[in-house]
Image: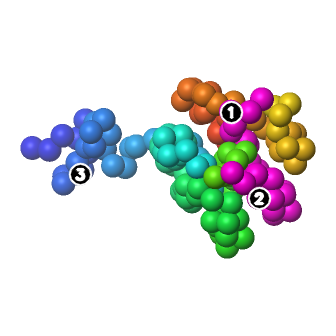
Amino acid sequence: MHDTSLGMMPGRRRDALGWAAASKPKPQLSGKRILVAEDEYLIATEVADVLEGLGCLVLGPASHLGEATSLARHSCLDGAVLDVLLNGETSAPLANLLRRQDVPFFVVSGFGRSDLPAELSQAPYLGKPFDKAHLWRAIMSAFGG
């Protein structure tokens, strides 16, 4: 006898949360390609984890301006998360490229908004340190709709 109470078909399995494969809710940002340009490993990992949990495809994390710029030039992006400084180089040229490509982005920084380079000062901003709830809100605001 098979469990059919939730529409389970013979041979179907449940994941760790008990969802049948066909009945899982679709992640909110499913398939969006988001560049992460961040040189601090723990922050880059946290940002990537939250994005992936929302269904995004993460490009990077890129810790150097050249790497991030190359990904932006050669990929079809739906958004980006930019640290202000990538190993000592400002991400302003990357922000300018993303604007020309009409790619939404937001900035994460330990600098106050008033200390940001002019090219980044008008971008959506998330100050470091941040918690997952603030990160989630910034992601949804920038890429959610």
Q: Say which of 22 and 117 sits in front.
A: 117
Relative vertical location of residue 130 with respect to residue 89 in this rendering, above or below: above
Tag 2 or tag 1, which sits nearer the N-term?
2
Q: Residue at x 67, y 66 (%)?
A: 66
Q: Residue at x 55, y 55 (%)?
A: 61
Q: Residue at x 9, y 44 (%)?
A: 1
Task: Indicate the amino acid at tag 1.
Answer: Gly
Q: What is the CA distance from the residue labelled 3 to the residue labelled 2?
A: 46 Å
Q: Circle 1: is it few (<14), some (14-19), or many (20+) Cα within 10 Å?
A: some
Could you say which quadrant of the image residue 24 lies in? Answer: top left
The residue labelled by disc 2 is 94
Tag 1 or tag 3, which sits nearer the N-term?
3
Q: Circle 2: is it few (<14), some (14-19), or many (20+) Cα within 10 Å?
A: many
- Mark 1 and mark 2 in contact? Answer it, CB < 8 Å: no
The x and y percentages for residue 138 are: 67, 34
Element type where label 1 sits in the image: loop
Task: Indicate the amino acid at tag 2.
Answer: Leu
Tag of residue 110? 1
The residue labelled by disc 3 is 12
Q: Residue at x 77, y 29 (%)?
A: 112
The x and y percentages for residue 90 are: 76, 52
Relative vertical location of residue 132 with respect to residue 66 in this rendering, above or below: above
Relative vertical location of residue 102 with respect to residue 53 in this rendering, above or below: below
